[in-house]
Amino acid sequence: MLEQQGFEIDGYRETTVGKVDTVLDASQPSSRYLITVETTTGELLLLRVKTPCLKPPATPGASS
């Protein structure tokens, strides 16, 4: 599904030593978004999304 949204899969790791441990890393060069999806205890997923600064640039001369 990430690839359909223009993300590139940068890494995938799956181990089964004791328990299933899976990590997926993806990036979207056009938006500079980075995503990590990881399994956790309790059948939950950890989702991390890193984005570039989404704050608009300051206007020169504008008072704060």
Image (tube, rainbow, N blue to C red):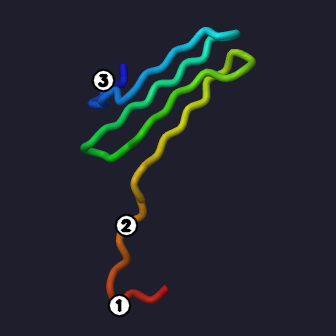
Whether residue 25 is situated above or below residue 62 in the rendered picture: above
Label 2 sits on residue = 56
Q: What residue is drawn where x is 46% and y is 25%?
A: 24
Is the residue marked by circle 3 packed among few (<14), some (14-19), or many (20+) residues within 10 Å?
few
> Which x, y percent locates residue 6?
27, 30
Q: Determine the CA span between mark 1 and mark 3.
A: 42 Å
Label 3 sits on residue = 3
Q: Determine the CA span between mark 2 and mark 3.
A: 28 Å
Label 1 sits on residue = 61
Q: Which residue lies furthest to the front in this view?
A: 17
Element marked by disc 1: loop
Q: What residue type is labelled 1?
A: Gly
Whether residue 64 is situated above or below residue 38 in the rendered picture: below
Discs 1/3, front: 3
Q: Quadrant of the N terminus?
A: top left
Element marked by disc 3: helix
Q: Which amino acid does label 3 sit on?
A: Glu
